[in-house]
Amino acid sequence: MEKPKIVEELEPFFNPKGVAIIGATNKKGKVGNVIFENFKVNKERGIFKGEIYPVNPKLAEIDGIKCYPNVKSLPDGVDLAVISIPAPFVPNVMKEIAEKGIKRVVIITGGFGELGEEGKKLEQEILQIAKENGIRIIGPNCVGVYVPETGVDTVFLPETKMDRPTSGSIAFVSQSGAFAAAMLDWAAMAGIGIGKMVSYGNKIDVDDADLMEYFMYDDQIKVITLYIEGVKDGRKFIEAAKRVTPHKPVIALKSGRTEYGAKAASSHTGSLAGADVIYDAVFKQTGILRAEDFEHMFDIAKAFAKCKLPKGDRIGIITDGGGAGVMASDAVAKFGLKMANLSEETLKYLKENFPPHAVAGNPTDVVGDTDAQRYKVAIEGFVNDPNVDGIVIITLFQVPLLDEMELIEILADYAKKSEKPIIAVAMGGKKTEYYAKILEDKGVPVYPTPERGVRAMAGLVQYAKYLEKVEGE
Amino acid sequence: MEKPKIVEELEPFFNPKGVAIIGATNKKGKVGNVIFENFKVNKERGIFKGEIYPVNPKLAEIDGIKCYPNVKSLPDGVDLAVISIPAPFVPNVMKEIAEKGIKRVVIITGGFGELGEEGKKLEQEILQIAKENGIRIIGPNCVGVYVPETGVDTVFLPETKMDRPTSGSIAFVSQSGAFAAAMLDWAAMAGIGIGKMVSYGNKIDVDDADLMEYFMYDDQIKVITLYIEGVKDGRKFIEAAKRVTPHKPVIALKSGRTEYGAKAASSHTGSLAGADVIYDAVFKQTGILRAEDFEHMFDIAKAFAKCKLPKGDRIGIITDGGGAGVMASDAVAKFGLKMANLSEETLKYLKENFPPHAVAGNPTDVVGDTDAQRYKVAIEGFVNDPNVDGIVIITLFQVPLLDEMELIEILADYAKKSEKPIIAVAMGGKKTEYYAKILEDKGVPVYPTPERGVRAMAGLVQYAKYLEKVEGE
């Protein structure tokens, strides 16, 4: 695929050769200090490979790095500016940026359109300068960009306040800055790898459509997640989504669904939320998967990051706890999937290799005295059965005779060699979390309840069906 | 209230003076060994205060405790027997138990009704002996009883496999043993206190109705949770629920809701699941709250354990992240609650005490540069507003100027002194979990997403409305 212009335009946001930090300061905890420190520490760690240019007329240097009095005095080679000075000063700095020939700007500063007419006028002024000079802007009123692999980190919350997730194959775009921060913090704990995060705030320029398109050509990114309160340019969004979704899954969490939510959204980012049915229709038409809440969004994203796509909607369930098997079966119905009818061969194979009290069927219940090998028999049967499209494996690691590491190796092995998606569910406490983490690192997504595991599988099925439809067109 | 007979009948299950462990063994990891060790260790810890009598004809002692060759040879004062010998031997032991005058029996052993006709005949034989001799049975095919306060623990999974939760005010009844074990393990991690857990398996005698009634008179228990696959005696269940729910909330998770789930349930515990609409009607009629999944069940249970009941359904939301406020507003609509219309006085009070960029309203957004005192202003306003029945407070602890401990003290203080229920939502990672734990220990329930926080509040509202209805009758 020939890459569109947007790819080149956005690239420096994620991997700049030189970053100017306008408003950098040595006052600990201030926004301009945290962002400067993020880059500096990442450079010391060998992750950020570009140059760092703090800009502050009152300082000669910050933490041993030379400080520039203004944009004009910067050396050549700056391809990204991060601005955290008060809103009224931003238009003037934008003019200097234009003169200097810097083409990418992240405006962290708040106090613009979200506060009313005066702020909107400032935004217009800034945008005008950008348009005339071919500058692309992320923000204002945002936390900006986080890329673990290149060390770009404009999130102005220090590591003492917020953990950073490791690198991975999920792109995360968020209209809300606080939500983005909370989510990164959560993703770090949950072990969810984020390839690139962009929080664009008032999005006067770069928007969801641009970012979707960029991520489509980004080899690191397997799945795109969006937290949206309102879309400004509906047509642009729809056209971009239509181009992207046949190549990569896009999952959207759109809040302001209800009258109450829409009202709250309008006083938050000034978004006119629009009738929710319209968003529903747009998402459906463009193949975007809609998430109910953030757990749902990342549950599905994790499945896409790790699983193959199913060929159909017939689900097989294996469990060592009957109750969990019942819950998973309920979830299969609830999320519009089908319980697979196991073939006669599979049932025969299972019965021949199971003790009499284990239950061959769908769900297959290896029961509470299972060892890892009995699971292996079940998985072998399900993987080879042409009537099964996707497999949900519930492992209550608590059962007494189960060697946890042996089972983990078996699951990881089948997830790798089978053409079918394999999703694991593990309910329990600290020990379960420990083993779940190991299993995820080996490529099998793990969910804490049968409902959430089956719901993630339903996301894979929904996207696979969409692909089938667009390929048939 | 005069206590019914069932209270006295079940009491020794939860606090026996002497427990006979029939099938106790010195073989590590075996069911009869784990159960024996549970009681022995809890006695050494000073938690279990009764006597322990292992029964095994082949051993003179286990771990220094005298072993008895049979039931007949046991001393007087045994008021509970726990059986873990193979199913075919159980009827004979039951006869000995009857002769000895022991009136309470937990039958852990599986291989009864769940395996077919022969097992059902064994169950009938056992039940017959029990009925003729006034013996009450929990089980068979179960994990039995766990009571942190008295040290009763028949859960045959050692602590190396499964953590135990601390003592608390939630009673947890589970038809499924593996589910019960996974849930105890999870509750331990989540910091959810369990007062008493009973997993009754095939429930040939003691059932949900008996246990609900017992817990109604149990001062430690504030809320009763049930995981049910099928109810055997519908009339008894309904009558008991009607007596219990005006005094304590009961939350039921009933699986086998769909055709798929019902089929799976019938091959698990042999439960005839029955049409789900009937269960829905019964729950509604008897005031039982129905949970969607186990997270939902314990989310609500935690709210009942810690919160006062709301006087109505008008919810106020306070947040430091606009996006989270939008999500919470959506959830208020989704779960059938109302957004409170703040009084003019409250709005005036908030505006007078807020900086201009904070948003006074519902939601009230104290915004990302908030400190703890700005939250205090908001809470003070909401607590004093007669138009607000319940308060959901979203704290993204990540924001830079917020002193977490100061906010925690403020929240705990208002939760104690206000007559309104206060629920907290904290999204984030490890630091958030750390602070959430402290806040919960101080009496404020904390939820990881706005949806789950508002859904828990909806549980409180639903129960408060039910109470209003029955009190009006």
Image: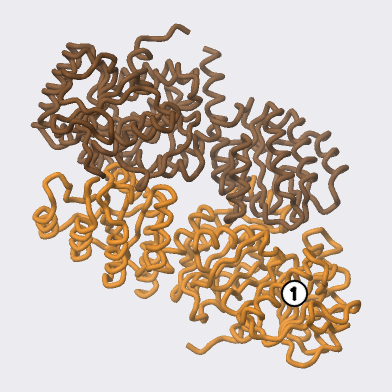
Chain colours: A brown, B orange
Residue A265 location, quadrant: top left
Q: Is residue B166 left or right of residue A243?
A: right
Nearest the camera: A58 or A439?
A: A58
Give A76 or A351, whichever is nearer the viewer. Answer: A76
Residue B150 vs A471, above or below: the answer is below
Q: Name the spot of residue B21 as percent of width and height, x first.
A: 77, 78
Q: Visible in this render: residue A271? A: no
Q: Which percent across, then down, holds residue A453?
A: 57, 42
The x, y position of residue B92, in whole percent, is 88, 78
Q: Residue furthest top?
A: A2
Q: Which quadrant holds residue A54?
A: top left
Residue A305 visible in the current orientation: yes
Q: Give the residue at mark 1.
A: B36
Secondary structure under tag 1 reads helix
Residue A128 point in image, percent of width and height:
15, 17
Drawn side of residue B217 relative to residue B173, left or right = left
Which residue sits furthest bottom?
B76
Residue in view at x 62 percent, y 78 percent? B45
Instruction: Using the image, determine if residue A421 lies above or below residue A325.
Output: above
Q: Nearer the viewer, residue B103 or A187?
A: A187
